[in-house]
Image (tube, helix red, strand yellow):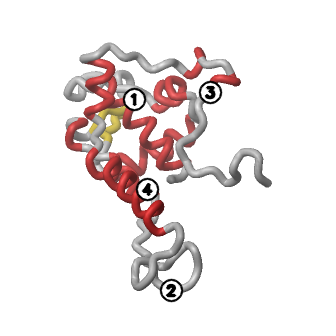
């Protein structure tokens, strides 16, 4: 559904949302990377982009680090998505040929339309407040990257390049 930069950015912002207290608590790129099991240089790179977009604020030196640029309830998943992904507004039919939805629908049209509606709902209706509430109000602590055995790591939420069992 989306690429590594988007996934890393959502992971970094969700971690900052979990500790959000109006900007007093700051986390370093190193700490975010460690907590989320990500590579520090990649976290640093996406934090720079997120900072340029006003989604995070960073400060250097002792006591420095990153915090959210605004309240987590004001940051939507789509705000991150649009920084790293090309929004596809093509009406071309993935089944082949002309414009999907004009005339007879292709065999996949209804299924793909439902998937796109679900994705749009998550992107446009979900804020990072969900992460703050989960940790701060419901005490749902995420499992640390160091606590997960290799065979229990979650699969990515990005679209796979290959389906399991298929070449």
Task: Give how far across and how far down residue 38 sits, in percent.
Answer: 57, 33
Q: Residues within 10 Å of mark 4 (few under 14, many from 20)?
A: few
Number of the front mark, 1 or 4: 4
Among the two numbered marks 2 and 4 on one chain, the one whose residue lies closer to the N terminus: 2
Q: CA distance from mark 1 to mark 2?
A: 43 Å
Name the residue that disc number 1 marks: 15
Name the residue that disc number 4 marks: 115
Number of the front mark, 4 or 3: 4
Secondary structure beneath dot 4 equals helix
Among the two numbered marks 1 and 3 on one chain, the one whose residue lies closer to the N terminus: 1
Considering depth in this image, is 150 or 14 the residue closer to the camera?
A: 150
Among the two numbered marks 1 and 4 on one chain, the one whose residue lies closer to the N terminus: 1
Number of the front mark, 1 or 2: 2
Considering depth in this image, is 3 or 43 the residue closer to the camera?
A: 3
Q: Is residue 100 above or below residue 2?
A: below
Q: CA distance from mark 1 to mark 4?
A: 27 Å
Secondary structure beneath dot 1 equals helix
Is there a contact, CB below 8 Å, between mark 1 and mark 2? no
Residue 140 left/right relative to 167: left
Residue 147 left/right relative to 59: right
Task: Give how far across and how far down residue 103 sits, in percent.
Answer: 41, 85
Among the two numbered marks 2 and 3 on one chain, the one whose residue lies closer to the N terminus: 2
Q: CA distance from mark 2 to mark 4?
A: 20 Å
Q: Residues within 10 Å of mark 2 (few under 14, many from 20)?
A: few
Name the residue that disc number 2 marks: 98
Task: Give how far across and how far down residue 54 sits, in percent.
Answer: 28, 48
Among the two numbered marks 4 and 3 on one chain, the one whose residue lies closer to the N terminus: 4
Q: CA distance from mark 4 to mark 3?
A: 25 Å
Q: CA distance from mark 1 to mark 3?
A: 18 Å
Q: Is residue 19 above or below residue 91?
A: above
């Amino acid at each position: 559904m989306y690429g590594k930069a988007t996934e890393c950015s959502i992971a970094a912002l969700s971690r900052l949302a979990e500790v959000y207290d109006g900007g007093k608590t700051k986390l370093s790129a190193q700490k975010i990377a460690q907590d989320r099991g990500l590579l520090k240089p990649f976290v640093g790179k996406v934090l720079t982009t997120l900072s340029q977009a006003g989604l995070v604020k960073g400060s250097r030196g002792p006591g420095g680090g990153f915090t959210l640029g605004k309240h987590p309830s004001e940051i939507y998943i789509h705000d991150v998505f649009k920084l790293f992904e090309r929004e596809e507004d093509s009406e071309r039919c993935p089944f082949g040929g002309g414009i999907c939805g004009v005339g007879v629908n292709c065999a996949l049209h209804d299924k793909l339309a439902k998937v796109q509606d679900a994705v749009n709902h998550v992107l446009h209706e979900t804020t990072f407040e969900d992460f703050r509430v989960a940790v701060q109000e419901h005490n749902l602590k995420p499992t640390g990257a160091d606590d997960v055995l290799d065979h229990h790591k979650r699969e990515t939420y990005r679209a796979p390049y290959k389906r399991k069992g298929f070449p």
